[in-house]
């Protein structure tokens, strides 16, 4: 994986969109001995014996987990992948008896790839993001937004249908677009601190895209709202699925027209311009500066690395 590739951006699955509406085909795939299931407890990935997170039908049966309401993620090299939310499963009791299951917060999970055991290939991390995001959507869309009836899972897990004949509305998984900005002025870039950040941590400014807005306009608007800086030329650089719960990050580059800061302290805790030379030192491990940079899971890190690589 190159620096340009954001974590979660690689997903090798054929998503099998053409088969989702075929219920018999879905059930047939789900019942295969070779099929693999990713389990999530809320936003946390279920791992067995500290290493294994892809479960077979035989293992699910052994642990007394049902496969109803599973989502067909796709197919890779003849193996079908599914995602299941285990919150309402017997899993919780099973875990207590077994003691060999653990839940891994997905947000921290990929960084372990580089420091501890290699739990999951980097080239497949996008599958985890896909599973977490769609399962999160199911958990938060159990009722019809139009009439309030409880909805039912459909279309191999990629839709929820309202059973009310008067309504019959179909609901589809949503993705929330977010812009995150590398803002530069000459050899300096703008870093900001969110109110929830760990002490000393700075990152790129970010914000949700609003209705009827381009990603370029959203990036310049957020920059001005949060830091009072006027943005000029704005370009898209790279994107990252960010399943917390279902965002899609658009990494943007803005060339600032102004440098004077007028920080909105309701939105962010701080912002400052930093020299490229200092960013390079901090990325190389120098901790003598008054700012730390985001971890490798964050697309902000990719944006900064792209900048210093020219
Ligand atoms: Zn309805």
Image (cartoon, helix red, strand yellow):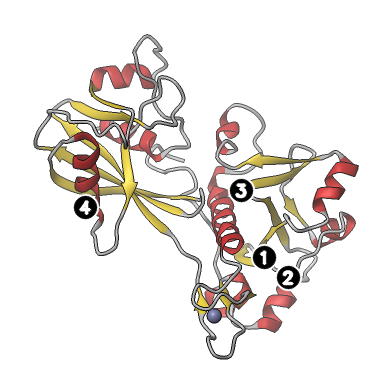
> In the picture, residue 67 is in which quadrant?
bottom right
Q: Earlier in the sequence, mark 1 or mark 4?
A: 1
- Assess whether mark 4 and mark 2 are in contact (beta carbons under 8 angstroms): no
Counting from the top left corner in percent of width and height, residue 234 is at 18, 47
Q: Nearer the viewer, mark 1 or mark 4?
A: 4
Residue placed under numbered mark 2 in the picture: 30
Q: Which mark is residue 43?
A: 3
Task: Please rate how many residues cluster around mark 4, counting C-alpha atoms within 10 Å: few if below 14, some from 14 to 19, many from 20.
Answer: many
The residues bearing labels 1 and 4 have C-alpha atoms spaced at a distance of: 38 Å
Residue that protrudes farthest toward the left in the picture: 257
- Assess whether mark 2 and mark 3 are in contact (beta carbons under 8 angstroms): no
Q: Nearer the viewer, mark 3 or mark 1?
A: 3
The residues bearing labels 1 and 2 have C-alpha atoms spaced at a distance of: 7 Å
> In the picture, residue 20 is in which quadrant?
bottom right
Q: Earlier in the sequence, mark 3 or mark 1?
A: 3
Q: Nearer the viewer, mark 4 or mark 3?
A: 3
Residue placed under numbered mark 1 in the picture: 80
- Assess whether mark 3 and mark 4 are in contact (beta carbons under 8 angstroms): no
**Residue depicted at x 54% and y 86%:** 168
Q: Does 131 sit above or below residue 78?
A: above
Residue placed under numbered mark 4 in the picture: 216
Q: Earlier in the sequence, mark 1 or mark 2?
A: 2
**Residue toward you, 226 or 253:** 226
The residues bearing labels 2 and 4 have C-alpha atoms spaced at a distance of: 42 Å
Residue that protrudes farthest toward the bottom in the picture: 165
The residues bearing labels 3 and 2 have C-alpha atoms spaced at a distance of: 23 Å
Q: Earlier in the sequence, mark 2 or mark 4?
A: 2
The residues bearing labels 3 and 1 have C-alpha atoms spaced at a distance of: 22 Å
Q: Quadrant of the C terminus?
A: top left
Relative to residue 87, is residue 15 drawn left or right? left
């Amino acid at each position: 994986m190159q620096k340009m590739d954001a974590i979660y951006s690689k997903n090798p699955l054929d998503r099998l969109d053409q088969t989702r509406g075929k219920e018999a085909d879905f059930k047939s795939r789900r019942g295969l001995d070779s099929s693999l299931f990713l389990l999530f407890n809320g936003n946390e990935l279920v791992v067995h014996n500290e290493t294994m997170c892809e479960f077979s039908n035989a293992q699910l049966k052994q642990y007394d987990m049902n496969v109803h309401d599973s989502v067909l993620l796709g197919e890779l090299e003849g193996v079908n992948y599914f995602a299941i939310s285990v919150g309402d499963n017997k899993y919780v009791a099973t875990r207590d008896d077994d003691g060999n299951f653990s839940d891994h917060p997905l947000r921290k999970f990929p960084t372990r790839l580089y420091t501890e055991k290699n739990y999951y290939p980097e080239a497949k991390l996008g599958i985890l993001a896909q599973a977490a995001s769609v399962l999160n959507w199911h958990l938060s869309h159990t009722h019809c937004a139009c009439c309030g009836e409880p909805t039912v899972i459909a279309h191999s897990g990629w839709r929820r249908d309202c059973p009310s004949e008067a309504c019959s509305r179909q609901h589809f998984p949503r993705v929330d677009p977010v812009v995150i900005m590398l803002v530069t002025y000459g050899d300096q870039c703008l870093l900001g601190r969110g109110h929830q950040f760990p002490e000393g941590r700075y990152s790129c400014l970010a914000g949700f895209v609003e209705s009827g807005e381009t990603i370029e306009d959203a990036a310049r608007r957020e920059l001005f709202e949060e830091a009072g800086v006027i943005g000029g030329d704005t370009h898209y650089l790279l994107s990252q699925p960010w399943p917390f719960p279902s965002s899609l990050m658009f990494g943007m580059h803005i060339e600032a027209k102004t440098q004077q800061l007028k920080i909105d302290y309701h939105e962010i805790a701080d912002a400052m311009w930093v020299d490229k030379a200092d960013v390079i030192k901090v990325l190389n491990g120098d901790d003598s500066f008054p700012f730390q940079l985001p971890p490798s899971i964050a697309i902000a890190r990719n944006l900064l690395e792209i900048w210093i690589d020219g």
